[in-house]
Amino acid sequence: MADTYRIGKDGVKVTFPSSGYTYREGKDGRVVAFPSSGYTYREGKNGRVVAFPSSGYTYREGKDGKVVAFPSSGYTYREGKDGRVIAFPSSGHTYREGKDGRVVAFPSSGYTYREGKDGRVVAFPSSGYTYKENKSGRIVPKKL
């Protein structure tokens, strides 16, 4: 099978099969190639195109203009005060939002989290790790 390519306004060359694929170029100048059948796409307000399966997936666009696609079943999403959307498994995971407005998701079991003076939440394994807060107030996990 022969390949074809497109060069986006961003100057990046994207190569994909000539048959059975299509592409879209977002307002941000990036080219995204994906199968012509069984896929769809959305372009966020930020101009970036995201392609995902047309069946069994959904998407959300955050206030930051980014589109996030994720499975329709078994996943949930949260949008932080910073406007970012994150998707994570609805079972066995939890999330925290830091004072910086970012949402962080992590496994409910075997993980812990700390929020630094910088307002960012950092999750890390509950055993075998410790943490320090650096000069800028960020939590930095360290393996024991």
Image (tube, rainbow, N blue to C red):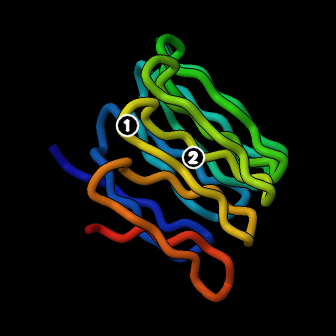
| 57 to 17, vertically: above or below | above
Q: Are marks 1 and 2 in contact (CB under 8 Å)?
A: no
Q: Is residue 13 left or right of residue 41?
A: left
Q: Which mark is residue 21?
A: 1
Quarter of the image for the C terminus: give it.
bottom left
Spot occupied by residue 80 in the image (x, y as percentages of width and height):
77, 44
Q: Nearer the viewer, residue 98 or 11?
A: 98
Task: Kindly identify the residue that appears in the image at 47 percent across and 25 percent down.
Answer: 89
> Quadrant location of residue 95?
top right
Q: Nearer the viewer, residue 30 or 70?
A: 70
In the rendering, at what x and y percent does residue 37 appear? 41, 21
In the picture as drawn, the residue positioned furthest to the bottom comes out as: 135
Closer to the camera in the image, 2 or 107: 107
- According to the picture, the residue beneath numbered tag 2 turns out to be 24
Q: Residue 74: image x %, image y %? A: 47, 14
Quadrant in the picture for residue 129: bottom left
The numbered dot on residue 105 is none
Few, some or many C-alpha atoms within 10 Å of disc 2 (few <14, some 14-19, many ≥20)?
many
Q: Is residue 144 left or right of residue 24?
A: left
Residue 32 is situated, as x and y percent measured from the top left of the image, at 49, 50
